[in-house]
Amino acid sequence: MKNKFLFLHFFFICFVVNTFAQEEIAIQHKYTAHNKGKFFVSWGGNRESYSKSDVTFRGKDYEFTVHDMKAHDKPKGWNIDYVNPCRMTIPQTNLKLGYFISDHYSISIGVDHMKYVMTQSQTANVTGDINLPEDQAGSIHNGNYNNTAVPFEDETFLTYEHTDGLNYINSEFSRHDDVSKWFSLPNIDKVQINLTEGISGGILYPKTNTKLLGKERHDDFHISGYGVSAKAGINLTFYKHFFLQGELKGGYINMQDIKTTSDSHDSAFQEFFFFQKIISFGGVFRI
């Protein structure tokens, strides 16, 4: 009887140990348990806000600074254009392609297609000199400005925007942490929750739309400067391969060579801070 009891006891222990071992193996083999070697791609939309900025405009016959220029974004709202290949640059969008170099770290390249529009209804102080030839339409604005308040309702003085767009082409290094266990999710291959943080940097390649001092409107792409940024977000992954991600991203932009007209002598420079709210959809997979 004693031997029979010992045998049953031993059998029970082996059963329990084997059960836990099988569960551990199953967890280790879940697709979402490891990220290293996976690729991901995402597409989404954003809203932005910008700090005030001093913008300096230079040319052969003028140099002046608009102090504390106000600007805003140009939202499209929920629209079919986000998925229409012929109209994808009309909304404010975010594209990202990335690769997990380890379970917790990834590298990626992306384009933040933001839009920056000078607020036309503002009055801003201007400092500098404008001495255009009298036969030019913009000569009505000739004069010496010494922190002079100027209402910009008159578009012959200045309209200024990066609306196709304020293109921030950047590379990013990010960390990812699975926090599904905080919510007691039993099967991380069905729903997984990740926190992500990252830093990025890159170039600004805006298409700047400008009408300056009565000159012909200019609207062309040009590498204009650089930016640096940091972000934090939350990622919800569904059924191994699909995810929804929300991010808050802030950064600094410095553009020292903005093209304002077709004349090579004309340019502008500015620096400012930006804040982005991003919602994107994507997929993650192995090749």
Image (spheres, rainbow, N blue to C red):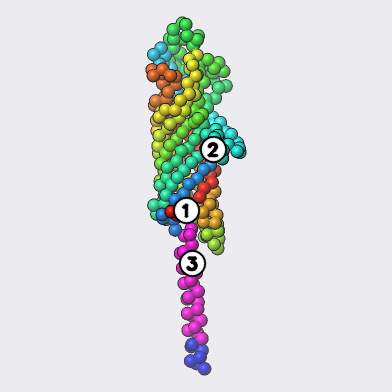
Numbered mark located on residue 285 in the image: 1
* Residue 192 coordinates in the image, percent (x, y): 53, 56
- Judge depth for marks 1 and 2 and give the one in front: 2
- Amino acid of disc 3: Ala
What element does badge 2 sit on?
Answer: loop
- Amino acid of disc 1: Phe
Q: Residue at x 55, y 63 (%)?
A: 186
- Spatial separation of the CA atoms under disc 3 and disc 1: 20 Å
Q: Is residue 97 above or below residue 50?
A: below
- Spatial separation of the CA atoms under disc 1 and disc 2: 23 Å
Q: Which of the 4 image quadrants contains residue 90?
A: top right
What residue span does the magenta drawing correspond to?
8-33
The single residue placed furthest to the front in the displayed view is 86
Crowding around mark 2 (Cα neighbors within 10 Å: few <14, some 14 to 19, many 20+) is few
- The residue under label 2 is 85
Q: Main secondary structure of the magenta part?
A: helix
What element does badge 3 sit on?
Answer: helix
- Spatial separation of the CA atoms under disc 3 and disc 2: 41 Å
- Labelled pair 3, 1 in contact (Cβ < 8 Å): no
Q: Nearer the viewer, residue 43 or 50?
A: 43
One can see residue 101 in this view: yes
Mark nearer the N terminus (3 vs 1):
3
Mark nearer the N terminus (1 vs 2):
2
- The residue under label 3 is 26
